[in-house]
Amino acid sequence: MSGPATLEDQSKPHLPRGVRLKLDETRNEWLLLAPERVVKTDAIAVEILKRCDGIATLSEIVDNLAATFKADRAVIDKDVRAMLSELAAKRMVDL
Amino acid sequence: MNAPLTHPNSDVSTQPAAAVPVKPAIAAPVGLLAELTHRCPLGCPYCSNPLEMDAKTNELETETWLRVFSEAAAAGVLHAHLSGGEPAARHDLLEIVAHCYKVGLYTNLITSGIGLTPEKVKALADAGLDHVQLSIQDAEAQSADRIGNYEGGYAKKQIIAKAVTDNGLPLTVNAVIHRANVTRAGKMVELAVALGARRVEIAHTQYYGWGLVNRAALMPTRSQAEAASAEVEALRTHYAGTIVSDHVIPDYHTKHPKACMGGWAKRTMNITPTGKALPCHAAETIPNLDHWNVRDHSLMDIWTKSPAFNAFRGTDWMQEPCRSCERRDIDHGGCRCQALALTGDATQADPVCHMSPHHDKVAEVTAVFADDDAPIPDYVYRRLKAAAAGD
């Protein structure tokens, strides 16, 4: 273990084994399931997490979101970095 | 008059039945702890299993467990925790894990590692297991094996930890802190990091059942408990991003009680090896609670209707100082079993709370354990037959 990885443009974020995005039909919401943790996710978080497949780079994910939702790339970039950094610190996303 | 009675705009005056206040819907359970068996090769003196344990012959059969997990998934349970005893003592563990995966449960194996092999770990990973929580007893082999009363246990656990991470499964290492290992709380966090764990759980001993029997041998002094807590908190920051630390504080030494179970019957349910559904693992210590069995009732009926689950649900059962306390929805009055054990009344505030009229009873206990260098009495090791303990 060499300490926390940092989020770079070329990082390929993905959910590690043991972390799952699940549509919970009982509560009718998307949840991020991790060891002893259940994290509620909003619609934006779900769109980000669905793109974290370990193949797309951070900058590709941001490009895709900006194009799909016709939004300001700089704003999206800031939001995506903030969310993924927070989840990486909780070991719910690997970079 | 066919409108549903619970419709928010229904005219109460024309519908007498609606005048009865409708109780808020009971939220679905989030977690289910399945104590698949009480059998375990280890003898940890703080074990959370009851003193009177279930024999193998009375354990639920495979098909009943599978039904329980199907019902759990349908009821909205997200996490299934396969525990014991040692769950690997069940020959159908692989089948149970595969079934949990099939019905969409997030499946967590809580194990001592003893009884597993690297091959079995691989098979469980292939069957869809999501996470492994491995216990350690200490960061030093000799002490660890003495605490667990199992020679060679420490070394076996290292092998199993490696098998878990080799198979790509996330690993949590959990350790219970007490007098014999309290000075190595930080070392145990470091061991967890070295074993490749993504999460570590450091829990100070809870004094029920075996823990209460062994309290004189387990309870650290206040200064030891505080030093261990400080060490664990410092390492949490140091290893942020490498390992997630969960820290169960030594509640005898705190001002506010723990939010036991996140509230009675609010988030999780326990199923014992014989199928009794409990709001927490120590609930059977509270007399006169009617615990329904999964052999006789569906999981959802138990969750919403059984007397034991409704006994301390919400806040109606509270007396002062809880009833009017601003923290009543934060700590839920603390632990019912601890209130009973220390005051004789399960509806009292947890006496750990500084507001409790019985708080002096906790202070009396902690005052006894004030000498850091006092010798540690022999353990009464956890065994299937409590009557045989000490022989």
Image: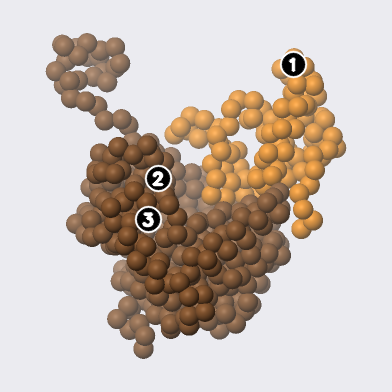
Chain colours: A orange, B brown
Residue B135 point in image, percent of width and height:
55, 66
Q: How far apart are the alpha carbons under marks 3 and 2?
A: 11 Å
- Callout in the foreground (3, 1): 3
Residue type at mark 3: give it.
Val
Q: What residue lies at 60% left-to-right and 58% top-to-bottom?
A: B230
Which residue is labeled 3 in the image? B352
Quadrant in which the C terminus of chain A is drawn: top right
Left or right: B308 in relation to B131? left
Which residue is labeled 1 in the image? A71
The extreme right residue here reads A10
- Callout in the foreground (1, 2): 2
In depth, the one of B233 and B15 nearer the eye is B233
Left or right: B184 in relation to B353? right
In depth, the one of A78 and B61 nearer the eye is A78
Q: How many labels sit on residues?
A: 3
Quarter of the image where one finds residue A55: top right
Residue B274 point in image, percent of width and height:
32, 63
Residue type at mark 2: give it.
Asp
- Callout in the foreground (3, 2): 3
Q: What residue lies at 75% left-to-right and 14% top-to-bottom?
A: A70
Which residue is labeled 2 in the image? B331
Q: How far apart are the alpha carbons under marks 3 and 1?
A: 53 Å
Left or right: B56 in relation to B374? left
Quarter of the image where one finds residue B370: bottom left
Task: Tell me if I can see residue B233 in this picture.
Answer: yes
Query: What is the number of the mark on residue A38?
Result: none
Residue B111 point in image, percent of width and height:
53, 65
Residue B243 point in image, percent of width and height:
67, 54
The answer as to whether the residues below labels 3 and 2 share one chain is: yes
Q: What residue lies at 46% left-to-right and 65% top-to-bottom?
A: B205
